[in-house]
Amino acid sequence: MARGLPSMASLAGLCQKLNRLKPLEDSTMETSLRRCLSTLDLTLLGVGGMVGSGLYVLTGAVAKDVAGPAVLLSFGVAAVASLLAALCYAEFGARVPRTGSAYLFTYVSMGELWAFLIGWNVLLEYIIGGAAVARAWSGYLDSMFSHSVRNFTETHVGSWQVPLLGHYPDFLAAGIILLASAFVSCGARVSSWLNHTFSAISLLVILFIVILGFILAQPHNWSAEEGGFAPFGFSGVMAGTASCFYAFVGFDVIAASSEEAQNPRRSVPLAIAISLAIAAGAYILVSTVLTLMVPWHSLDPDSALADAFYRRGYRWAGFIVAAGSICAMNTVLLSLLFSLPRIVYAMAADGLFFQVFARVHPRTQVPVAGTLAFGLLTAFLALLLDLESLVQFLSLGTLLAYTFVATSIIVLRFQKSSPPSSPGPASPGPLSKQHSSFSDHLQLVGTTHASLPEPGELQPALRPYLGFLDGYSPGAVVTWALGVMLASAITIGCVLVFGNSTLHLPHWGYILLLLLTSVVFLLSLLVLGAHQQQYREDLFQIPMVPLIPALSILLNICLMLKLSYLTWMRFSIWLLMGEWGPGWDWVQEEGKKDRKG
């Protein structure tokens, strides 16, 4: 056999390890990081992560090119879909108060392989998010000085017309990322203090925009003469929603920072709810006043709000808006660069990424190596890539992470609780893993009652009616029902998105197929709901499981299918890079361990 390749026995063992789960633990709050963030810190971190370039850049771009004034509906649908996902993150953040976000949530419920893929995907989400925000920040700052920076760069450096690349190298964007990375590497308290300052200014500017915008509103701009309220129809609203998801990435930042929260089980759910409500209100109100101030088809997609005030004769207000946008984008950038190295740290500490990124600086108690290395990578992308391509790329990664977290909630609710660990040594099972990370030997410790059935078993009250489901081992029916639910959700999404355009179904065939798949989807939910779940009175838990996670999965799938095939191709290339980069290094390490054993 070729040198360096694992043997067949090693591959068989590897396949078994790919499905191993990371156990949960409630018993310890010890961490290598510093627990110093309050509920207010987490809330402002979430608000800062959501209210930024999405408000000042995406609002105008989506209104002009995708949805028209109905962009406010796009933000509303995106907020609802984000709320469904946010509830899932809130439950996991309270239950597993460790850094890692969607990566860790997937690891404890679905297995190591899926955890690595989602972790690699979350890295993409934060890298692309940071680069997109930096380019938006640069564009707004440049517009305040009549695009003198762009003109100077194009004159002395040059410009190009290349797909996926910006028209010129954006040195301002790269510079702000490097500066923000330097601040983040100084510690969580420094990052939090900067975020508080910029967030306060940003919220005051948003309040100013809404008040003055309603004063200057002209309802005629929504009339049929200007194209109407929804010139692109329902399809435009949904297409705009897929892009508007970029606006609500911030609550994931809260979950990723839970290991540094003082009281994560209370603070994380509360901060996620408050920050999402503030962000949704800001986006809907600002998009409303923007399209009422000037006709939607005449908006400047690069700096819509500032340009709208300029055109209404309020040049001074335009400068206030531009200054507020700079502060808002600073908070987004700080939030993303704060969370990115912590995801890397979680993966490296679990042995699924390069070990150099698992080191924590002894004084600042932050993963400095990951902060600086990925700050440089993000700066390089911001220097060269185009904002529009980055946003669609980000939307796909975000939606996929939301889908896995929602699925993980269903899996975890129907998993059998592990008994409390005994003081004596336990013999590891065939799928056990020796961890050396901050989250070693996490266990789910639930309150069990002998009178209650095990999670995954059919509820006693329903056994006389559904006795044919009671003959299977606990969890088997749940697994099949979950698989059917996911398959039917994908089918429903394909029918809704491609039924009339790509598949060219007749009207009766479209309705029939939609009804059949919807019935299967609902039946799978009923089967899941008929089985016993885990219940914890001491932690936040989502109501109406499996309905809320299932609706989140369905909506996320529909929005993912709305994205272009080029976005899917680029995303697939990124996943392959992960598999043949750090993923292949991990496979080789596991093979070496098996051969030594």
Image (spheres, grey):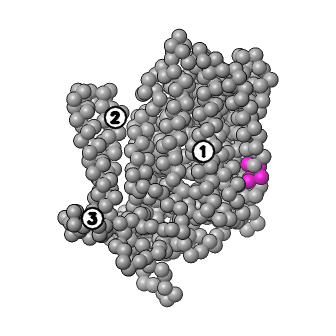
Decide: is 356 above or below 281: below
Q: Residues within 10 Å of mark 1 (few under 14, many from 20)?
A: some
- Name the residue at 63% across, 25% down: 290
The mark lying in front, picked from 2 and 3, is: 3
| Residue at the outermost right position | 316
Give the Cα separation between the discs numbered 1 and 2.
29 Å
Q: Amino acid at mark 3?
A: Leu
**In this orientation, which residue lies closer to the viewer: 274 or 202?**
274
The N terminus - image quarter: bottom left
Rendered location of residue 459, percent (x, y): 31, 67
Q: Is residue 192 magenta?
A: yes
The image position of residue 448, as x and y in percent, is 43, 76
Q: Which residues are magenta?
A: 191-195
Q: Please state which of residues 70 and 371 is positioned toward the viewer in this rendering.
A: 70
Query: What crowding class fits label 3: few (fewer than 14 Cα within 10 Å), some (14-19), or many (20 or more)?
Result: few
**Label annotation for residue 496:** 2
Q: Secondary structure at mark 1?
A: helix
- Who is closer to the viewer here, 199 or 150? 199
For marks 3 and 1, the one nearer the N-term is 1
Label 3, label 1: how far apart the Cα atoms are: 38 Å
The earlier-in-sequence mark between 2 and 3 is 3
Viewer-side label of 3, 1: 3
Judging from the image, what secondary structure is the residue with disc 2 in?
helix
Quadrant, the C terminus: bottom left
User: Label 3: which residue?
Assistant: 462
x, y percentage for residue 137? 69, 35
The residue carrying mark 1 is: 277
Question: Taken as a whole, is the magenta stretch helix, strand or loop?
Answer: helix
